Image (tube, helix red, strand yellow):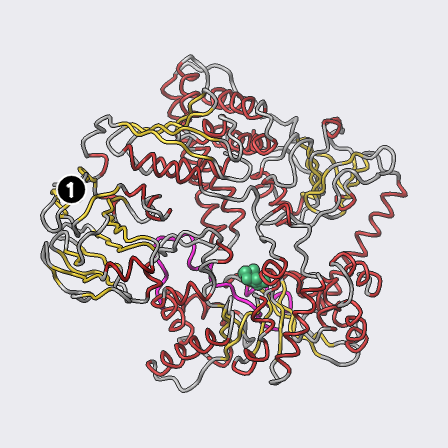
Amino acid sequence: MSATLELLAPFDGPSVPLSRAPDPVFAGLMMGDGLAIEPMSGTLLAPCDGVVAQLARTGHALTLRAANGAEVLIHIGIDTVKLEGEGFKPLIKAGDSVSQGQPLIEVDLDAVARRAPSLLTMVVIANGEAYALKSRAEGWQQAGQSVFLTLSGGAAVDDLPRASGAESRGQATVRHAGGLHARPAALVQNAARQYRSSVQVEFNGQAANARSVVALMGLGVAEDDDVAVLAQGEDAAAAAAAVIAALQTRTDSGHGAPAPLASVSARSLPAGWIGGVCAAPGLAIGQVVRLDAFEPQVAEFAVNADSERDQLNHALTEVSAGIAAAIDDALRRGQTSQSDIFSAHLALVDDPELRGAAERDIAAGHSAGHAFRQAVRAQCRVLSSLGSPLLAERVADLKDIERQVLKALLGDAQSEPELYPASILVAEDLAPSELTRLPRDRVAGILSAAGGATGHVAILARALGIPALVACGPQVLRLDAGSEVLLDASQGGCDPAPSAAALASARQTMAERERRRADMRADADGAAVTLDGVRVEVAANIANEEDAREAVRHGADSVGLLRTEFLFIDRRDAPDRYEQANAYQAVLDELQGRVAIIRTLDVGGDKEVPYLTLPPEPNPALGLRGIRTGFAHPEMLDEQLRALLMLRPLSLLRILVPMIADVGELRLLRRRIDSLAEEMGLSERPQLGVMVEVPSAALLADQLAAEADFLSIGTNDLTQYTLAMDRCNASLAASLDAMHPALLRLIERTVAGASLHGKWVGVCGALASDPLATPVLIGLGVAELSVSPGLVPEIKARVRALDQQACLKRVEQLLRLDSAAEVRAQAAEWWPEA
Ligand code: PEP
Ligand code: MG
């Protein structure tokens, strides 16, 4: 039975809706629903009886667990964690039982107000799924007297009385790059689903149900467009605020930076070739499989509408379960780009508008398959007519869903095209699931009439290493099924009728490349030693145990960077030391005696974890991220350090710290490690390295190297911070080149600083995986290159063909060049790639 719990005001002062908190984490209800108060009295009183489940070390926040299980989180002020406890005097400790009205924390309001952006105090129900807020106070509150919030506890939300019809309106400016396309629409849908109120998004005289991804996309909202939001129901204000926050969240339009592909169709191609945009490079010969012309047959009419509806529901459930499993699998493998794509698909399968349209068609006497196909096609027409390339690309996603649902309805036999041993898939626009579903060894290449380099299929093709040409135009759809074509995606073209000589020459090139790759793979286990006898450690960048196996298989000498973020993202709370230690130990075990450099958590900025109360960041890349986040959440950092210290043997572990700006941070961390190791009774310490990712660290490398065991350069961030170019900004991607002379000088300076103290320097940023950069980095004195596992054989082969002394001399000249382009051109001339 549901009991009602009344929470009394924790301070004197006016209540403020949570949506007005100057922090998107609270305003967006990410921490839970509740109410805020502007404190006018200096003592925080317990709003209810309960146990102190958690008290922040810095005394600015606590959680009370009430008798009905509700977790009442109270957070005093915004950004107050940074005050490190100054201005807060807790009167209780974690584990204490407290009674309603009891003083909990004394707050020096003046002192806090001077140093924090706001004193606003948020009271939220952190485990709100099973509770419903029945009332929120308005106006002036008296601490310990006024009823501030009422919640009915323990009742399933759906059992609670229905919405009272309150209305809340607001405006939002859509900040998602590229407008409301599939993933942003899925974010908005997800926000709307957390509330019982109905929410509409209105644009250009049209309204869309915020719980429907297709309806939202159908509005054709572009980036920076203003939309209206109307919520109706008992939690209307909160629902509107959450949807507005989701609309206004800034996200990127693609999944990571597009590959540096120069070959847009403008390049001149031989006569008769079909030109397109290179979405994934490579050369392929194969027979055309016309996916565009393949349509499973579905009956148009059916006699029993109930049975058709059941079949549709069953098919939708089956497809949802399949996609959810694909998301889990992608997340486990750390492939967030794939999981993002599948999440957007899941939202489409669940879409109430699509389902509604199909059900209406079934009721009119049509079969489930026909009805669903009609519903999808109608939506595709809307998206194609909106004139937005990004939304037009989402047509492929919808067709993919159609295909999957028809497959679930009809079974495999009727819904799969037949493949040749080497197939070139041809389609208007390819469905992403086609690539993951079709046998990889039979797919030689991809040609699509539509699509773009930012399309989902392009991302997947790159990940799978399948040469792909997109946006080839309708002529590609005139290719005869079964005909043999030559696809040179790197050149941005396809020869639809290759001569015997062209085929023979392409086969020879492919065979040579394959032979070289096989030779490299065969030699991969040996050491990478230059012609003049200098050994370069070629390590792998990995995220988990599976990658560790992959690294060993490809001959990596060690792991140069284990990004631990994969364990922390996409979950509701942080992993404890045992879970972490298990995951890290599994990696170490896979490495069979090789060293693993494990980086402490690098979140904040654009890498978010939902359970950390990170402050709003006007400039995320310059805010709380890397080790700064660790220092701001010492309990989480300590837990990770403990997990690392639990690994055996410790001699194979090296701890790497991200985003260190100066030696003070390094000392702090070393002290933490020492004291935790002492607590754990350890006499041995793992080596401790510093990531050089900000210019200050490169400039102070001598100071850092005096106290660190090694340095590892993160060129991705070092480039972003040196050139002042956001690494997530696709329009800057072409200029964001780590071969810039400024970067090379910083690398030189880092190596010089480290060598003063006999310490080695590695590179673990993406520059290390670029074969053109290998001689440059060796010439700069870098001792370790940590690269993508699959590239280990190639980079080792490259090292073996170089003379370090010669590289050294030439690099001096590169440092004097004007631009990254000049460095690349000169390096390509001196050290051509085979
Ligand atoms: C880097 O910045 O180069 C790096 C390796 O770290 P990440 O890419 O994880 O930020
Ligand atoms: Mg980095």
Query: Along the line of sight, which residue is nearer the eye, 33 or 291?
Result: 33
- Which contiguous range is marked in magenta? 548-577
Which one is in front, 800 or 811? 811
Of the 4 image quadrants, the one containing the C terminus is: bottom right
Q: Is residue 13 visible?
A: yes
Instruction: Indicate whether 648 appears above or below 297.
Output: below
Describe the element under mark 1 as helix, strand or loop. strand
Q: Amino acid at mark 1?
A: Thr
Spot occupied by residue 669 in the image (x, y as percentages of width and height): 43, 75
Identify which residue is drawn at 43% across, 55% down: 569
x and y, in percent, of residue 554 in the image: 64, 65
| 81 in magenta | no
Residue with the mark numbered 1: 150
Q: Work out whether 383 lies above or below 783.
A: above
- Image quarter of residue 53: bottom left
| Residue 574 falls within the magenta-colored stretch | yes
Q: Position of residue 775 (x, y in %)?
A: 75, 69
Query: Callout 1: few (<14), some (14-19), or many (20+) C-alpha neighbours within 10 Å?
Result: some
